[in-house]
Amino acid sequence: MAAKPKVPVKLVSWDEIVEWSRGLASRIEESGWKPDVIVAVARGGYVPARLLCDFLDVTDLLSVQSQHWVEAARMAEKAILKFPYKLDLSDLKVLLVDDIVDTGDTLILAKDFIAREWTPKDLKIAALQWISPVAKIKPDYYYIEVKEWIWFQYPWTRLEDTMQFITRIFREDERVKGKIIREDELKSVFKEWYGIEPESLGFYWDMALEKLAAKGVLERVEGGFKAVKV
Ligand code: ADE
């Protein structure tokens, strides 16, 4: 059996996203509650929120954007809301949607903001997934309860995540740091770190390497790749 990956990753397909969103919509419907407006937490909540609009027959879709800041002094991540605009939703029932409730910080922030600044008649939270052992809040609706932390590689961040996964190897793996590594070696280290085959990423693998080279993070050299500034 293969060794446990450093970072457990589950590749989520578009089909799974549709299936999970449909299941989530059913849970909401079965509860007898119907939102007037859906608010997507940007950017992870966009696709699920749009699918919920379709499945629940909701026309109005808004968004708030959260952003993570690394607090220099504490090296802790802090969530803030970008573009905090004001609205009056006093006559409306709002469903706030994100892809996943991990720590829950983003959703707590967005929920408090909307409750305070948009004053909706009612406000509930839905997410495709809820990592119950680490989350500070439980969403009103979720489709999958995750009991052990995993990085869910959603289809809308496939390139971004692949680039970050590769960068982390060049930054942290002693066998790779400062060396020239052949692409087949990189693929096997990648598999070890993340537990997924680079082949399963399709065109995203090549695209990630191309973009990293174009950004000057990696350099394509005779026989492989070398880190430049990771
Ligand atoms: N965003 C925050 N936590 C996540 C996780 N565990 N998987 C995918 N996206 C996330």
Image (cartoon, grey):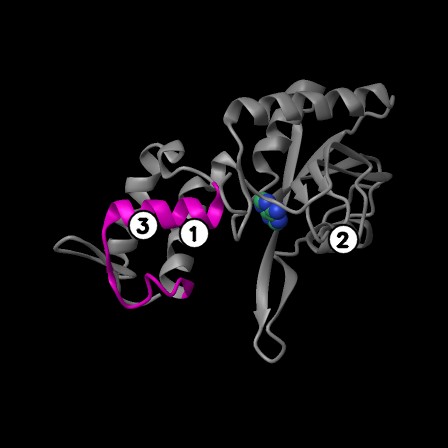
Looking at the picture, which amino acid does disc 1 mark? Phe
Q: Indicate the secondary structure of the residue bearing disc 3.
A: helix
Looking at the image, residue 74 lies above or below residue 23: below
In the picture, measured across the screen, residue 78 lies left or right of residue 134, that is left
Q: List the residue tagged with mark 2.
A: 108
Q: Residue furthest front?
A: 1
Res. 52 in view: yes
Residue 6, x across and y down, in percent? 52, 53
Spot occupied by residue 59 in the image (x, y as percentages of width and height)? 66, 25
Q: CA distance from mark 3 to mark 2?
A: 39 Å
The quadrant where residue 127 appears: top right
Q: Residue at x 30, y 54 (%)?
A: 212
Farthest residue to the left: give it.
Answer: 222
Which of disc 2 and disc 3 is earlier in sequence? 2
Q: Which of the pair 143/33 is nearer the observer? A: 143
Instruction: Classify mark 1: helix, strand or loop.
Output: helix
